[in-house]
Image (cartoon, grey):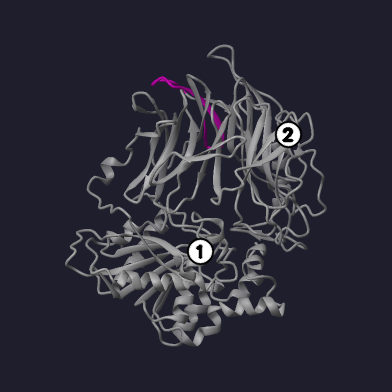
Amino acid sequence: ALFTQSHYSQDDNKSASFISVLDIATAEIKRLTPDKIGLAFSNPLWIDDSTFGYMHNGSLYAQGLQTDAAPTEVYKPAVGISSVSFRAPGQLTFLASVHPDVATLAESKTRADAAAATIDSAQVYSNVWVRHWDEWMTLEKPTPFSLPLTRPATAAGNWTVGAEVNLFRDLPPFADPLIRWSCEEFAVDGSGAQVAFVVRQPSELMATVTNVDVYLVPADGSQAPRLLTGNVDGIASGPAFSPDGRRVAWLQMETPGYESDISRIYVHDIAANTTQSIARDWTLSPTALLWSADATQLYAVTNDAGDIPVYTVAVPSGRRARITGRGAVSGLRRAANGRLLLLRSDHDECNNIHELTVGSDQLRQLTDVNGDKLRDVYLGAGEDFWFRGARGERVHGWLVKPVGFDPRKKYPLAYLVHGGPQQANSHAFSYAQWNPNMYASAGFVTVQINFHGSPGYGQKFTDSINRQWGGYPFEDLMRGLDHLATLGFIDVERAVALGASYGGYMMNWLNARTERFRALVNHDGLFSTPLFWYSTEELWFPEHDFGGLPYHPNARRTYERFNPERYAADFATPTLFVHGANDFRVPLEQSLAPFTLLRRRGIPAKLVYFPNENHWIQRTGNSVRWFTEVLQWISDHTNNTIPYKLSA
């Protein structure tokens, strides 16, 4: 198995990523590409049993597995490519952001160069879908391409690169060139003959509808793409071909305008052109699919009560069985002899590759790539608890005890509130800002609660947050705090709360509705729910969750009922705000407003502004600074002494 590792140098403020090969039988690892700060080797793929490929500096390379093998540049595309897939004997498929209706990548580059030479930089929009996440809409859109690739007959020969084929070329044109077909993801069958791509349909209503479809197309583009999801207008995702290429499965939401609907499993018979939905009695919502080697069942990854396990789902009966235990699974792949390879993590275990023997459900760890680095680092396990929350329903959470825990002492509380809101905390090792051990290692009892709206507890529980943003979740958090107060080692008088996105919204809502926290940390959170609709990009999101348009009286009542701005005069808790300039989901003004409010009223507040970040903190140096500011803020307000020195 090929896999990629990366690591960061704080001195250089740069990273290195490199590729290694894992011998599954012996668990031996051999590094295949250089490990040097500033170099990136990515997108590993198999060409044959003794040759692998990868992307480096914008080119595709091939290299033998032997130690002294030299790399060969196979393909140097005219523009950047990603998600590169190779199928023997020689079919390459990838994504490239290109101009409308181009036949080749070179043609798109020519158009881009011409556009860059114009005397003005204006982009003119008439469709409200003007930006998404952190990018303004441009003429270039992610587009699937394929090309034939023939390896040389001798080691000294050159690879033969065939003509590029734009797999979008036979889709109907759309009048607005800035609002065009855009590929979200794709899958290729085992022979390289067929491609299933997921595409957002262009329309005048792009910002208000969730019409994301699956198309099937020959990899050589010899026929026009065939729509597989014409009878449903929800979000489709995750196509997966059966090993024999006769069927393709995908995940399908069925409620238009609802991005957190339950994902149903659809199975399409390609020759018969029929589609069947299976396992419709399942109340969990899978997030990824993989076929078994004999194509009699699917492996489905899903949220399940704080875990992210693998289930088997029989085809077509839909009968299910959970085959992994505690922890979070990702990166599922088939291995030999009915086994699976997967990544698994938990609060106290970072991602490692494991082998799962299906049937016995035995899990064998194959890597321990960070064992030496974590040997002397405190990593506490998550300890589960349940309590009665809103509507009298059971609510799940867990806590991580601080470093050097002494049950006779009382510790300050760090209350982490997840975003989404229809997302969930999980028993996983997070590499972002919400790893509970970052706070536990600083001396806090750290708690995460999966309040109403979280997936993994049945779709009704997820749906319950609709039109209840400040209702049921707030009640869950307050009752959770009451439960924690009964534990003898938590000082709830020294509690802080932290959250991002919806979690940041909840920080503003806590500031408006309670004084139970010494301080708050609000990352990219909503302050004004009506302004959110007027300034965000995915309008279907607030329109669904708040029940309509904010200028319609009935919906306006819901927006205002749970609008923190409405209670601005009640804000009294010191707050640290964090925001990225390129966050178009929750624009910067949503943090500037409550920061201005608190400072104008003489209440302690800080604003940490990252001009080169979006909805998340993606640069490692910025992440170090994020933790430095946050841990110092919550410690200052709880009289907590951090047991180590923070970075300057």
Question: Which of the image's four quarters has the N terminus?
Answer: top left
On residue 611, the disc is 1
Three-letter amino acid code of the residue under disc 1: Pro
Q: Which residues are magenta?
A: 54-70
Residue located 50% across and 25% down the image: 52
From the viewer's perspective, is 8 left or right of 72? left
Residue located 51% across and 65% down the image: 501
Secondary structure type for disc 1: loop
Between the residue at mark 1 and the residue at mark 2, the CA separation in whole angstroms equals: 41 Å
Question: Which of the image's four quarters has the C terminus?
Answer: bottom left
**What is the number of callouts on the image?**
2
Secondary structure type for disc 2: strand
* Front residue of this view, candidates 617 and 385: 385
From the viewer's perspective, is 174 left or right of 579? right
From the viewer's perspective, is 290 left or right of 397? right
Residue that carries the numbered disc 2 in the rendered image: 217
Q: Can you say whether 440 is above or below 429 in the image? A: below
User: Where does residue 137 sit, x and y in percent of width and height?
Assistant: 68, 56
Residue located 37% across and 67% down the image: 415
Q: Is residue 101 visible?
A: yes
Three-letter amino acid code of the residue under disc 2: Val
